Image (tube, rainbow, N blue to C red):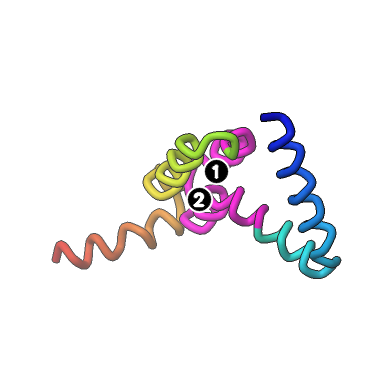
Amino acid sequence: MLTDLDQMWADMTAAVQGLGLFKGILFVLFFLALWFLPVIIALFRNRDHLGRIFVANIPAILSWVAWLALIAWAFTGKCKTGEGAEAEREPAKKAAV
């Protein structure tokens, strides 16, 4: 079992070393964007609990269930009071009229 993990680790490090600098930077940026996707969603949707989502997101990468729960929280959380909250409520008001 341990030799399989050692072989997988050796294969992964060889693949990463073969990427090159530009592709390596793109890979890291893509990985970070995917990791912090709940924070990005909460930021663009103007959520009130952005800081809490950020803090909970750091260890959540270890669990897909927690990460998906943070995605749901980012989409369904309370909006901040102000312009963002009003802009999000306006389409619902227009649809009701």
Q: Position of residue 36 (x, y in %)?
A: 60, 49
Residue type for callout 2 = Ala
Write down the region rendered in magenta. 31-60
Toward the top, the furthest residue is: 2
Secondary structure beneath label 2: helix
Residue 13 within the magenta-colored segment of the rendering? no
Q: Position of residue 34 (x, y in %)?
A: 59, 54
In front: 11, or 40?
Answer: 11
Name which residue lies at 79% across and 65% down. Answer: 19
Name which residue lies at 63% across and 56% down. Answer: 33
Toward the left, the furthest residue is: 97
Q: Position of residue 60 (x, y in %)?
A: 57, 36
Residue type for callout 1 = Leu
Q: Which mark is residue 50?
A: 1
Q: Please state if 5 lies on the left or on the right of 18 as rendered.
A: left
CB under 8 Å between discs 1 and 2: yes
Residue 45 within the magenta-colored segment of the rendering? yes
Q: Which mark is residue 42?
A: 2
